[in-house]
Amino acid sequence: MKNAHWQADLQQLRHLRLFNNVAVSSLNQLLSDFRACDLDAGEVLLSPFNRNQYLYLLVKGQLAVHLGSLDSQAVSTLKIGDCAGEISFIDNEHPSAYVVASEPSCVLRLHRESLFDLFSQSPELMQNLLEMLCARVRQGNRIILDSEQTANIDALTGAHNRRWLEQMFERESTRSAFNGNPLCMLMLDVDHFKAYNDQHGHLAGDYALCLLAQTLRNQLRPKDSLIRFGGEEFVILLPEMGSDEARNIGERLRHALHQVSSFHSPIGELPGITVSIGLAQMQAQDSLQGLIARADGALYQAKQQGRDCLCG
């Protein structure tokens, strides 16, 4: 980062969020405490490994924000008028992210020692900075929420994953024990899936799994959880449902897939698939592993009986 020859355009600066409603008479005095700096494309402005003493206001170019590693995908992009480093600037701690110039950029830099003097000169500046901090916190909360949702979803089928199963079983088993309501699990396995892949290709197999997930979702209640357990195996958690009703649900799901003899896909017409299903109802003091083991045992029986059927 090197010092820049930058000519302030007061009319333009007044429209930036940090200087919103700051009087022109105060703006010249405020700007005297800022220093302009140029950044080359790819240059790191902030790093979690280096303590930050500055607030940066972007006046030209674009900055990318990375969490955890510079190799990770950018979680947000800072544009002209956005600030960087405002949290570490105030609390004098290390930044929580990398901020990198994604193209040649120019920033205005303010040392933290000037902070309180500027606030006394312009309360509007303090209010603007606090509002920008609030926006950054809200953005961070959205990133956390999106990350949590992504971490619980299988990218191919859109079904939940095993991490979600562990969370939901803990919640639903506790609720079941407290309310005395039953809890059932269905374990499904696509019949002869290896042969399907060998004959039609792995891409066709992926589309078949997506068909399966979509078909199952359309038949389930909002409170039910569809989980891709691994490969071509899926698990369905059925809260507040006994084994007789769960057996009816399982047969309905199996029949719905059995009825699809072929389906359209981006690679053309493909044959449908069938599933074998194992059923288990949670018993007192059952762990997730114990319930899975019994559902898997019932699934094995369904395969031994010729597949495309339900046992348990």
Image (spheres, rainbow, N blue to C red):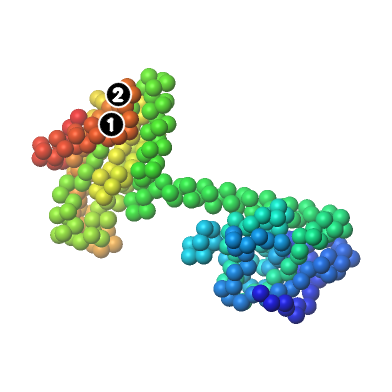
Q: Position of residue 299 (x, y in %)?
A: 19, 37
Depth check, front residue: 104 or 192: 104
Residue occupying image coordinates x 46% and y 47%? 149
The residue that mark 2 highlights is 283
The residue that mark 1 highlights is 290
Badge 2 or badge 1: first in the primary sequence: 2
Q: In whole angstroms, how far apart are the C-alphas of marks 2 and 1?
A: 9 Å
Q: Are marks 2 and 1 in contact (CB under 8 Å)?
A: yes
Residue occupying image coordinates x 56% and y 50%? 142
Q: Would residue 73 be visible to someone looking at this image?
A: no
Q: Would residue 143 be visible to someone looking at this image?
A: yes
Residue occupying image coordinates x 52% and y 47%? 145
Q: Position of residue 298 (x, y in %)?
A: 19, 33
- Secondary element under disc 1, as helix, strand or loop, is helix
As shown in the figure, which amino acid type bears the numbered disc 1? Gly
Q: Position of residue 146 (x, y in %)?
A: 50, 50
User: Crowding at label 2, few (<14), some or many (≥20) Cα neighbours within 10 Å?
Assistant: some
Disc 2 versus disc 1: nearer the observer: 1
Q: Position of residue 132 (x, y in %)?
A: 70, 55
Quarter of the image where the N terminus is located: bottom right
As shown in the figure, which amino acid type bears the numbered disc 2? Gln
